[in-house]
Image: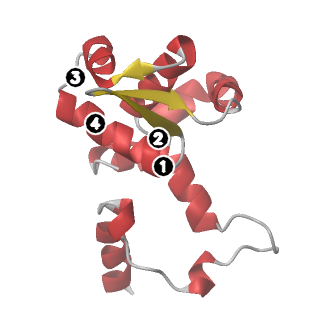
Amino acid sequence: MADQVEALRLADRKHPRTLPVRSRRMDAPSEPGEVPPTILARFLHALSDPTRLRILDLLIRERELHVSALVERLAQPQGRVSAHLTCLRTCGLVRVRREGKFRFYAITDQRIPALLALARELARPREAAIANCAYAEHHDLMGG
């Protein structure tokens, strides 16, 4: 069992397009038409990084930005910003438009700002508890 858990943890670190297909039983939603818990967890995981949240906030405010503008505003290396954009694009949260040598990014769904606003509203009264959550801290330290 521990070997399976470790294998799944390592698989989660690989690029989403190279992930192994998991057992249907593990991914089975409780009702037909529902999103399986593992897919929902990955969706939320895509939102769980501070840099990815900052990227989404910038795209919400600016509507569309190219990678260089994001790199400048985030003050992070281009490779790191591109990796976060790849995650967001692969998960379907942002789209890319090419114009000449530039790639412009924008959010894909106008409900994303409302989702982030709701998350902030839910987190605000729980901020101290969330900051002290040892499980979330462990996740952060693991590079999750």
Q: From the viewer's perspective, is 123 left or right of 15?
A: right
Residue 136 in view of the camera = no
Compared to 137, does 116 lie above or below? above
Residue 72 in view of the camera = yes
Find disc 2 in the rendering and name its residue. Answer: 48
Give yes or no for contact between labels 2 and 3 (Cβ–Cβ under 8 Å): no
Mark 4 or mark 1, which is nearer to you? 4
- Hey, what amino acid is under mark 1? His
At numbered mark 4, what does the secondary structure look like: helix, strand or loop? helix
Find disc 3 in the rendering and name its residue. Answer: 76
Find disc 4 in the rendering and name its residue. Answer: 82
Residue at left offset 36%, top offset 83%: 4
Spatial CA span between label 3 and label 1: 21 Å
Residue at left offset 31%, top offset 15%: 69
Q: Looking at the image, tell me whether mark 3 or mark 1 is earlier in sequence order.
A: 1
At numbered mark 1, what does the secondary structure look like: helix, strand or loop? helix
Give yes or no for contact between labels 2 and 1 (Cβ–Cβ under 8 Å): yes
Compared to 8, does 58 lie above or below? above
- Hey, what amino acid is under mark 2? Ser
- Hey, what amino acid is under mark 3? Gln
Spatial CA span between label 3 and label 4: 10 Å
Residue at left offset 53%, top offset 47%: 92
Compared to 25, does 44 lie above or below? above
- In x, y percent, where is residue 42? 51, 56
- In x, y percent, where is residue 98? 38, 32
Q: Looking at the image, tell me whether mark 2 or mark 4 is earlier in sequence order.
A: 2
- In x, y percent, where is residue 28? 67, 78
Q: Looking at the image, tell me whether mark 3 or mark 4 is earlier in sequence order.
A: 3
- Hey, what amino acid is under mark 4? Ser
Find disc 1 in the rendering and name its residue. Answer: 45
Mark 2 or mark 3, which is nearer to you? 3
